[in-house]
Image (cartoon, rainbow, N blue to C red):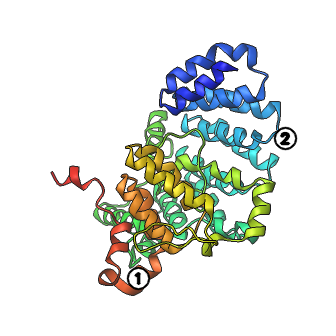
Amino acid sequence: MADQVQAQYFAQQGELTKAYELLKPYYEQKKTTFSYLITFASMAARAGEVQAAVGSYYTAYKLGPRQKQAKEALYQSAFLSYQFQDYDGAARRFKEFMQVYPSSALNQDAKWQLAWLKYLKGDYNGAYRSFAALQNEKFKGRNRRNKYPADRMKYWMAMSLYRQGKQDQAKSIFEGLAKDSLMGYYAITANYRLKKISAATPRYVNRALPENSLRSISRMPAMEFMMPTIDDRVMATVALPGETEEAFVMQELAAESPEAEAAELAEGSDEKQIEVTDQGQPLQDNNANPVLVKRFEKARDLMTVGLEDWAKWDLYDIEKKTRNKEFMKSLMNEYNSVGYYHRSSYIGQVYFSGQRSSMGVDGVRNLWEYAYPKAFSNLVDK
């Protein structure tokens, strides 16, 4: 319908409230139409109408659980419930997702979310056991690359012990994390926790926290270090440009389609498909992936005309489709140029830790600067 097209135009222009209000009058008439519900839910979420988005996504999934976007709809319903702090509803939907789509790669993310929800609700013993189970879980085949970073899992296991008042056990894990010679995020945070433990006598946290206390915990910014995703390779379709990694959970769905899997098996990894010049420009040769080359060119064009927020999505799409180290270096530079520092930091810490460790600061200073960027120095240094 014309209004649906108009709503999509408003959304692309950033006028999300207009897009939502344009679709809202049709809800009663179209609430049994799968395509309408998906579009309406997406607009509602981006406009901040989370309750409407959760209900619409879940209704769409119930209408057609085998439709192409049904998996996305159910997962979005669960994830938005979590964001709206409906923790019980989120847990139910994550469990339902795992039951209905047992072969989905997003099940690993759902397992993390369930453990994290226990932590937010104050069930620290249950959270510890869930984090430990995830850490010990063995991955096979394609999903092997989806394993969560060990330091992230250990940190939240330690925090679960810490919140239970088991200071000695937590301290032992924190000390192990603090020994990281690369001083990643969790090493720094573990050091901070160790100082707190040393400065104060052991205290036992009141497990019966009032509701307001739990809500305040849940409002902590869900940055990259808070909410892991599957190898950080997924993207939320409803998120606005510039949001945190929490917004990137749905891109995995595209890679799970039969067509995508067939293409992956036929073409293999594009590790050797893209080369980069010294200036960071991708070379267009016979082996280059033309889609990624075009996305890179598009991102540069968007930055040239001042649309940095839009360029970020193209850069992220490139990142998720290649593991070419030279291309990653080019991406870190582009991310920094548009203020997307947490992405360049992630690449620098995850993919170049070996080089930084073996060659030191003087050997690869640029990689250290990408891993720990001076974000927004023009404002901070004033």
Residue 285 place in picture, x, y as percent = 59, 71
Residue 135 place in picture, x, y as percent = 62, 67
Residue 356 place in picture, x, y as percent = 40, 79
Q: For the point 77% across and 29% down, which residue is it?
A: 34
Give the structural element (helix, strand or loop) at label 2.
loop
Label 1 or label 2, whichever comes before in sequence order: 2
Amino acid type shown at disc 2: Arg
Asked whether 337 or 241 is in front, the reply is 337
Residue 341 place in picture, x, y as percent = 38, 57
Asked whether 49 or 329 is in front, the reply is 329
* Mark 1 crowd level (few <14, some 14–19, many ≥20, 10 Å Cα): some
Reading the image, the residue beneath label 1 is 357
Tell me: residue 44, above or below residue 210.
Answer: above
Outermost residue on the front side: it is 285
Count every numbered label the image shows and give the total: 2
Residue 122 in view: no
Q: Quadrant of residue 197?
A: bottom left
Cα separation, mark 1 vs mark 2, equals: 48 Å
Q: Quadrant of residue 255?
A: bottom right
Residues at badges 1 and 2 in contact (C-beta under 8 Å)?
no
Reading the image, the residue beneath label 2 is 66
Tell me: residue 46, above or below residue 293.
Answer: above
- In the image, 245: left or right of 365? right
Asked whether 360 or 50 is in front, the reply is 360
Give the structural element (helix, strand or loop) at label 1.
helix
- In the image, 266: left or right of 286? right
* Mark 2 crowd level (few <14, some 14–19, many ≥20, 10 Å Cα): few
Amino acid type shown at disc 1: Ser
Q: Quadrant of the N terminus?
A: top right
- In the image, 198: left or right of 66? left
